[in-house]
Image (cartoon, coloured by chain):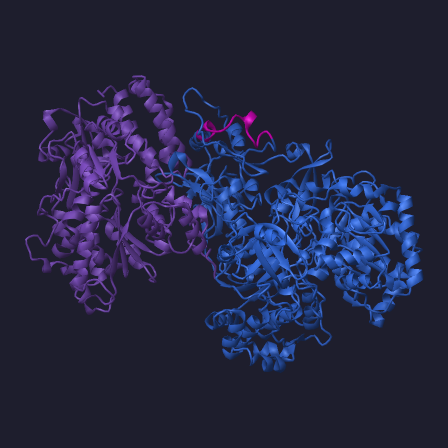
Amino acid sequence: MATTSATQPTAITNNVSLRIDGQEVTVRDGTTILQAAAELGITIPVLCHDDRYDPVGVCRMCVVDVGARVYAAACVRPCEEGMDVTTTGETLDRHRATLTELLLADQPEPTEDPKETTTGDNELLVLVRQYGVEKDQEHLPQGAGRGIDDSNPVISVNHDACILCDRCVRACDDIQGNDVIGRSGKGYSTRIAFDLNDPMGESSCVTCGECVAACPTGAITNKPLHDVPIRPRTELRQVDTVCPYCGVGCALTYHVDDERQAIAFAEGREQPGSKGRLCVKGRYGWDYARSPQRLTTPLIRREDSYPKGPLSGDVKGEGRGRRKPGGLVDYDEVMPHFREASWEEAMDLIAGRLVALRDEYGPGAIAGFGSAKCSNEEAYLFQKLIRAGFGTNNVDHCTRLCHASSVAALFEGVGSAAVSTTYGDIINADVAILAGTNTTANHPVASSFFKQARRRGTKLIVVDPRRERVADHADIYCQIKPGTDVAFYNGVMHEIIEMGLVDEEFIAKRTSNYEALVELLTQYSAERAGQICGISPRTLREVARIWGEAGAAVVYWGMGISQHTTGTDNARCLIALCAITGQVGRPGTGLHPLRGQNNVQGASDSGLIPMFYPDYQPVDRPAAWERFERAWGRELDHVRGLTVTEIVGAALKKGVRGMYMMGENPFLSDPNINKVRKALSALDFLAVQDIFLTETAEFADVILPASSYLEKDGSYTNTDRRVQRGRKVLDPPGQARVDWEIIQDISNRVGYEMNYSSAEEIFDELVSLMPNYTNLSYGNLGPTGKLYPNADPENSDGTIVLFQDQFNTEDGLAHLVPAEWMPARELPSEEYPFVLNTGRLLEHWHTGSMTRRSFALDSISPKATVFINPVDAERLGIADGEFARVTSRRGTIELEAKVSHRETPGSCFIPFHFREAAANLLTIDEIDPFGKIPEFKFCAVRVEPATVAAAAGS
Amino acid sequence: MSTVNDAVPGREARAGKFSGPSLIPSLNVIQREHGWLPREELARLSRETHRPLYEIEGLISFYPHFRVQPPPRVEITVCRDLSCWLHGADEQIAEVHARYGEDAQIEVREVSCIGRCDIAPAATVHEHPVRAADVGAAVERALATDEADDGAQGPAPRTWPNDPYAGQAPDARYAVVRSMLAGELDADQVIATLKDSGLRGMGGAGFPAGAKWELVAAQEPDPKFVICNADESEPGTFKDRQILSEQPHLVVEGMLIGMLAVGAEQGWVFIRHEYGIEEEAVRAELERARAAGLLGPDALASGRQLEIDVFTSPGGYILGEESALIECMEGHRGEPRNKPPFPGVSGLWGKPTLMNSVETFAAVPIIQQRGAQWWKDQGVNGGTGLKFFAISGHIANPDVYCVPMGTTARELVELAGGMADGSALQGFQPGGSSSNFLGPEELDIPLDFKPLADAGSMLGSGAVVVIDDQTDLLAAATNVLRFFRNESCGKCVPCRVGSHKAHTILTDALAAGLGPDGVDARIDRLEETLRMTSICGLGQVALGPVMSVLRRGRAGAPT
């Protein structure tokens, strides 16, 4: 990793010449013997070494004769001028055989070896066969007796099979930056250990499985999931596709057992962004598709289940305080309200009702929610149906809930909502700010690159009220008060200007409105800004100095920036910070809002937002609408449609009456659920297309069984702008259908003809209408996808750094927008003294419909919890694991308390995945005026022991 | 952009080693406060320092100094290694176990050599060294007063031939350092003299000291370090202990000369924690040097900063290996590194580091004062200079002796009063536990680097262990092997697994009453692989002594 190719000497380094097995070779100084030998096509056996890791030289299998008193480990020994190296021969082979024999002595029998009996690729046993070593039980004492650790639900640790090669240690530290595994003990009793020699399942291990990928023997292996046996890869079918979870879009391979129609296991796959890494969700979280709760037939609400409303206790709001984990919907409670129907009947009903509502109340009475989990093709087709088929722009998706404010600010500031550089480009940065992003949980693989860059010299500045794991890696951690980002960044910019560290030339040539920004910033001295955000003026100046002096600096941000009523202002500050210091448009610089969903970038690109046609062509701009009217053959609505949050409001007021929901679950994902419940109940007609009977589906008139990600082809665009192909792995269960076919079917029934025969055909159409996707095709996306824009996808991975010469705005300049700090809408009071922050956990995804049906993810994280600081916990009399009652002006929930040093005193954090204790019962539905994004990160609540509250309430 | 991976070629991956300050001092603080390391305290340390828990586990499970259980009222350790074993340690250990094994307030632990081979079989009570036979009295004292020390003064310091200040007033000391600080003697002269003297490292490897100093002096400055390796821990070896105790001023002066010669401002004495008494002597000497103005930010108003601190080893023979010692000081598990790079180029915290042993540094002042030729002239039988030997085992007067290099083993044995109880010598290790056994017919070989190497053994750590003809030499060699197995750090496969398997094979052979001819030939193969493929000297020599006995036995010599 650290060493570059041995074949490419550069001018500034020296070369050394040596002989290896009689062959002359010249390599760059610092090249190891192993690398130089590889150049000559000489293979030296290794066990502890893997090109992905820096060498340690502990297994000694690669020893070679360099003419010294003892042998040298080729993996770590650098080449020297005039060295004469022998890599093979009878003596060396004898030593290698002896080493192999020593290791074999303590190994389990091959018939019981966890690797040999599963994937069948135990690297030690390969050497055993190569050297013809036999287990000599007569003379060599056998077995280390270190035992087995089965405490992790999906990973088995067999210490006897461990050869202490330290690959897992390096994988955990150097690749993933999780820092869990090390060596414990000394000498022969040494073993790998998790944390303080704790069982793996009780340690701080995040189950990313990188150690499984690293282990050469049966020491760390995957357990089979759902009794699908793990077999050699050659006996399984490989499907190269993309992870369905977050926006990082890691490339992976599923190994499929066709007899059982099931995935046996998953592995990371080489790709320029993710480089073969995965997190727990990607590696272990795919089994939801096999859940017995999958919908397999269309369902129609029974007559006697009208008037419509919630069906299950949880959704009615009666589930409060239900103290059992694994809160999946109880089908026995809900299913009786629906009857099975044929596709014909269900589709006719949907088309008929929606058309009738449109005809009676106008196109604006119809709205559609698509999903960022669906493909580009499905997003494109869905918005095409709503826009061309129903004639309204009321189409949106969950981007509204994550980065809508970032998108608004980026459009205004730089004319493009896409990231200006990739997450991997951090390696070229001197400084990186991670702003409001719990990256280790929400973008785990991206965080691994951040942590790795830091170890290689990038200074990491983490700005977040929650001290999450990535903060442990920060050079400077700024625990700002919630909702004070604008003050913080204004303060930093003020100091940068004071110190004269702005880039005058960049400001003059590439920005506008700098004077107005300076004018505003005069009010944000480090002292005043620091007082607002709770950071010392000294630290603010330090951040300003480090950023201002950096050769290359980049900012990555998450929902902590966007999910505020000042979300757009927060993002404006980050744009200004980069622009006034010239930190955009070069490697290692720029703006990167980390996208949440696997395809939130692609869905937005494809037009699944009310104000834009595909590729951000404004619906209210004549040139744009004329283009799409021509392409789609229909007259279109020329007024911006309603957003997710506005549609909910409109439903309550009977403005929107009929909805088509594809893969969205607003009941859990939207703020102030009590209001959402009323809105959904008020709809005249709701069609829900999903893979499970979600909370939202309880309000449906018709429910359509859709296909999971694993059951269809399509393309997905990740946070880096990488467009990758997802490939079908399994058949949909029962009568479930592929989503784009369902959309096409409905479209044809509402009188707007569609006639696509494949996802690829849809992709070609959307590319023809999306200038940024120009040149891309299924053919040239290849196995690892391509970044857009891309002038030559046949030969190039695409553009990493945008805005090298100009921004995408009409005048090509970055528009600086001064932002005043404004407090959050609902501040803590005597009655509601805590700030509630909401977000995600590593193991769960949004409304939990997928992750809570995954064995691994649900086993590791089965419970709804409220995280509170130890100081607050003690003051409130709440111990770790006890139940707390959390109340806001909008609702109340009870859930287990987790006492955590990572929380700011006076704040609490609740993940929003759990239907039995839904955080969004508490959140406020105030929105940012520009991005229309709700303030999920800030509302006032009261926290108390559940027992006290219950007694007081009863 | 600069990256931490602009490292010296060959530098290993960090694999569990974290940059940043060592956690060992913090662990020491916790242990001092609580007497042990409670889990909550470790979790707090991890949280506050942002360092992984596993790093802490790696340290506390590696270093015997750290306790993860509350301490007993009285802690007894008993040595099980060669010199003590020759004096009936097995029986003494069994007796101590029998007497205190059931007592909940007393803990008995068997430990590796504690460097008290002159009072073998040796033990400690509350870290205070005693003869194993005297454990009872020390335990009584400890139970009564929580203090095992009987307050008795050791013998008065002797006069040693390597001390240029012998017989002079204490303020005459540090003359060489004073000259250097006054600009009368420069670094080049010092190094030239040292090179001319032929002084070789006395820690075991025998690398020419002058060449090492020259190499470190030639490195780019910013900053360099000097370390005195006072971690002698090899069974039978206690000569450095005597030098530290009786001549700490020579050690400190030697280090200061080294620091001035190579351009270092900071030095450390890395001393094993079992040498508490000697550590006090060194600390007292450092205070004297400081009081004399030799240590401090502006030593003798020369503008040079000179600081020396003591680093107490958290335990383990392996730390005597120079790169393991550095790993320990950096706060890592004491696992030797693959070399190159050597510490002279990339040592402590990646900086050029001059490391010599106690005896080496202690020889420097007299060499600088009396000249290279004087030093050379001290040797006999072709040897160069003076040499300290610790002699133990079946010898009448086990002690430390300073003799001309090249003195024969027979002469040394005679100097030490001959064999104990008039017994006959069967064999001896001339250079500590790593050296191959020699027989009575080899008593006239000069104790010097080359003659011993030619005889198939080595000068090693300067510890001569003599064994009488009533002893099972194979059992003695197996005892030595057990020491290496116990002290293997576990980093590399051949040493970690090979030393364990070999020890089991030999113990089984001994239990079966087999002689050298009966021991499986697999040992020969293991010895060869350990010697050729292990990372460090420990693994490379672990099976050497056993093999030397087997070879002698198979050749027909009595065992």
What color does chain B have in the rendering? purple
Quarter holding the C terminus of chain B? top left
Q: Position of residue A720 (x, y in %)?
A: 66, 58
Above-or-below relation of B140 to A866: above
Q: Position of residue A787 (x, y in %)?
A: 69, 58
Above-or-below relation of A423 to A220: below
Which chain has been coloured blue in this picture?
Answer: A
Above-or-below relation of A518 to A778: below
Q: Quadrant of residue B537?
A: top left
Q: Quadrant of residue B236?
A: top left
Q: Is residue A894 visible?
A: yes
Q: Position of residue B8 (x, y in %)?
A: 41, 54
In the foreground, B101 or A758: B101
Above-or-below relation of B133 to B55: above
In the foreground, A791 or A918: A918
Q: Magenta span covers which residues?
A: A101-117
Q: Say if the magenta span includes residue A775.
A: no
